[in-house]
Amino acid sequence: MTKTAYPKPDRSDLVPNFEKKTPEDIVDIGWNEGVFSDGRPYRVESWRQNNATMLTYFFSTKGLEKAGKEELQSLLEEEDLLYCTSPVQYIAVQKIKDPSGNELWSVNIVAANEGMSYAEDKIELQPYPKK
């Protein structure tokens, strides 16, 4: 049985922001990359806006085109990338095109807000290089 080839998420258009100049500014925290058990590459990014800390996972929609947010959340938990610390979850999913033209899932999860924890990333994040 051969594994399907999945595109690696291309985030080459991301310019990290490290300082908050206005209340609405996003401040980028860190990122990491890996591969799901089916060979599908993923990328996770963490960022803050207002009082919320977010986790966004990017991976190919191939074979998951009709997945809903519950299925995508379960996938992240089954792949041991995400641990939900609360029964209440704030998740948004959308299909996006990356700079290479790949269709990706963008799964955005509120990890914490106003002192409440909802989810934790289970892999160590790397800081963005400062230029």
Image: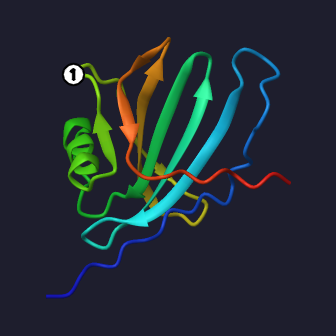
Quadrant assignment, res 12: bottom right
Residue 92 appears in the rendering? no
Question: What's the residue at 13%, 88% (across, down)?
Answer: 1
Total labels: the figure holds 1
Instruction: Describe residue 129's horizontal placement relative to residue 47 as left or right.
Output: right
| Residue 60 position in % (x across, y down) | 38, 61
Q: Dot 1: what SS? A: loop
Give the answer, above or below, for where 37 lies relative to 25. below
Point out the residue furthest to the right here. Answer: 131
Most foreground residue, 72 or 94? 72
- The residue labelled by disc 1 is 87
Give the answer, above or below, for where 73 lies relative to 126. above
| Residue 52 position in % (x across, y down) | 53, 21
Instruction: Describe residue 124's horizontal placement relative to residue 26 as left or right.
Output: left
Instruction: Describe residue 21's horizontal placement relative to residue 120 as left or right.
Output: right
Question: What's the residue at 57%, 63% (across, down)?
Answer: 10
Within 10 angstroms of label 1, few (less than 14), some, or many (20 or more) residues?
Answer: few
Instruction: Describe residue 82's horizontal placement relative to residue 15 as left or right.
Output: left
Q: Which amino acid, by three-letter code, is at mark 1?
A: Pro
